Image (cartoon, rainbow, N blue to C red):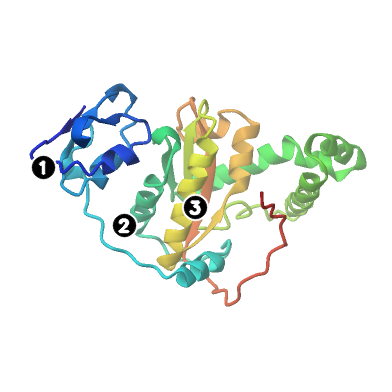
Amino acid sequence: MIEIDSTKCTKCGFCFEVCPNYVLALGKDQEIQVRYPEQCCICGHCVAICPENALIHKEMLAGKFEDLPITEIPPENMRNLLLSRRSIRVFKEKLLSKDLIERLIEVGIHAGSSSNGQTENFVVIQDRKVLSELEKMVIEVLWNKGLKYLGNKVGQKLAKTNLGDEMLRQAIPYHHIIENRRQNNELAGMIFRNAPVVMVIHGLRTNFMAHANCSIAIRNMEIMAKTMGLGTCWVGFLSAAAHLVKNKIERYLEIPDDHCIYGAIMVGYPKFEYRKIIPRKKREVRWI
C-alpha cells in the first residue's frame, strides 16, 4: 500500500512522526520502513508532510493532493469571525447557487472524523414541497412524542424525572410555541424558517463518534458560510425528531437504514446584519 522512493527520501523522519497508527518505523541510519501496513487508516498525513514527495500511497494517488498555500489569519480576525457568528432565522428571498453549496460541502467533507472513517454524508434540500412535508413531519413527531404532555404539571413532573431541571426548562417554551401556532394555524415556516436551503448530514448509527463527526463538519460549513456572506442556523428540531422515531424521517429523505441524522442547518442570505457581539453566560473553567 505504501512505498518509499529511496532516491528522493532524505530520512527526515517527518512521515514516521506524524503517522497516527504507527504504520512506519525507523530502521538503520534513520531509513524509513513500512512495518505495519495493515494498520493504515488512509489519512494521507505521510504523503502531505513529505517535503520531497518520496512517499507513494496506492490508496491516495499523488495527483489527488493539492499544494497548500500559506495562509495567515491574525488571531484577532479569527476571534472576531467566530464571535460574530449568529444563528440566522430570517433570510432574504434569494436562491443559492450550486457552486456556493458545493463549496460548503467541500469544507464539511474536510472536517476531521473518528479513525478517518469519513462515513458521514449529506442531503441538500431545496425543493419547497419536500421542505413543507418534512416540516409537518417534524412538528408531528415532536408534539406527539413528548411536547404535548408538557402543558400540565403531571407531564412536567414526569419529564423532569427523565430530563432534569435544565432540559425541562428549555423544553417547556417549545410546548407553548407549537400549541399557540397550532391554534393560530401558523405552523408553516416554524422549523426551517423559509430558508432557501436545508443541509442534512447523517452518519453510521453504530459509530459512537458519528454525532461529533457530523457536528464538526457542520461547524466547518457554518464558519465558511459566514465568510461568503451567508447565514446559517442549526435545525435541532429535525435531529431530535429523527431520533425520537427511528428511520421515519431518514426513509422520507432516502437515507440508508444503517445511518441516522446527526445534524442539519438552514442556509441562506441573512436579511439583517448583526452589529454587536452578544454576551454569554459565565462558565465554569477548571484548571488541573
Residue 284 on image: x %, y %:
72, 55
* Crowd tier of the residue under label 2, counting other residues whose Cα lies within 10 Å: few below 14, some 14–19, many 20 or above: few
- Rendered position, 84 above or below 205: below
- Rendered position, 95 above or below 50: below
On residue 8, which mark appears?
A: 1
- Residue type (three-letter) at the residue carrying disc 1: Lys
Assign a secondary structure to mark 2: helix
Q: CA distance from mark 2 to mark 1?
A: 39 Å
Visible in this render: residue 199? no
- Considering depth in this image, is 255 or 49 the residue closer to the camera? 49
Residue 247 on image: x %, y %:
55, 28
On residue 99, which mark appears?
A: 2
- Residue type (three-letter) at the residue carrying disc 3: Arg
The residue carrying mark 3 is: 219
Residue 12 on image: x %, y %:
22, 44
Q: Is residue 179 left or right of residue 19?
A: right
Visible in this render: residue 5? yes
Q: CA distance from mark 2 to mark 3?
A: 19 Å
Q: CA distance from mark 3 to mark 1?
A: 39 Å
- Residue type (three-letter) at the residue carrying disc 2: Asp
